[in-house]
Amino acid sequence: MKRSNRTLVMMMMAMGCITLLILSNVLYTMTSARHFRTGMNVKEYKDGDIVKTEVLKAKRGSILDRSGEILAKDEDTYTIIAVLSKTRKDIGNRPAYVQDIDKTARLLAPKLGLEEAFLRKKLQDARDSNMYQTEFGEKGKYLSNSVKESIAALKLPGIEFQSSVKRTYPNSVFASHLLGFAQYDEAKKKITGQIGLEAALDEELSGTNGSKEYQKDADGNPLPGTEYTKAYAKDGDNVVLTLDRNV
């Protein structure tokens, strides 16, 4: 009988501890608007801000001459971004912002073809102004994949990249008046033809953007396992001309 009483008491104590933990979590969430275990901002989740929608950009088709030489194509490029805000943390709660300005400026200078002093001032000014992040002008944009990878290999905290696409013309002189040009349209979120064949064949060359959604934590980091592709991107068609650039 005594053993049964002890068992009952232990069970009641265990249930009491569980109840206390639940109530503590609820109280913490109510007062801080953050989930006790994950740190997720409950108000943001409720308002829908925690769900991030990202555009999956379609690739514009290439224009080729009759022998298959590329006359116009999309090229993946990158813009380098330096995050200065101390609120930026990675998934492991490690600092994901620029900590050592001098080191960052010294290592980035030869990669970007910029003066170390310029980069140092840019970073320091951003920090002094309490800016979340900063960029480095034209030389920090349209970086090739090889340059981007060489910078990423430095593993500098706070240095991130924003992907973009630009239209390139490998044989810029050949038939430029006929090809015309295409450029990024902010409203349509894709490259569109402006003049020449790029404009006349825009429907064939243009693809259809897709989209994906994922949840992020209170610090803006994607939550593993939450990514969902709503619609896949459909790339545009390639167009082959009767022209021959070698003739």
Image: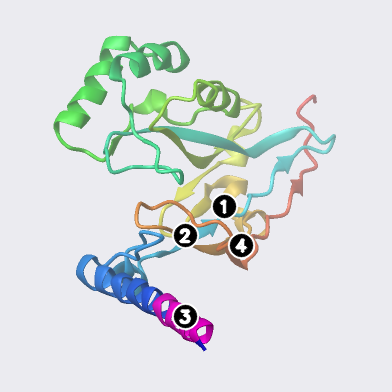
Measure how far apart labels 2 and 3 are at the Cα level.
70 Å
Q: Is residue 83 magenta?
A: no
Q: Residue at x 57, y 62 (%)?
A: 227
Residue indicated by mark 1? 199
What's the residue type where badge 1 is placed?
Ala
What's the residue type where badge 4 is placed?
Thr
Q: Nearer the viewer, residue 192 or 80?
A: 80
Residue indicated by mark 2? 188
Q: Residue furthest toward the left?
A: 129
Q: Earlier in the sequence, mark 1 or mark 4?
A: 1
Instruction: Provide residue 146's location: percent of width, then percent of height.
Output: 60, 24
Q: Nearer the viewer, residue 181 or 32?
A: 32
Q: Residue furthest toward the front?
A: 2
Q: Earlier in the sequence, mark 2 or mark 3?
A: 3
Q: Nearer the viewer, residue 54 or 159?
A: 159
Tag on residue 208?
4
Is 185 positioned to the left or the right of 121 in the image? right
Q: Is residue 8 magenta?
A: yes
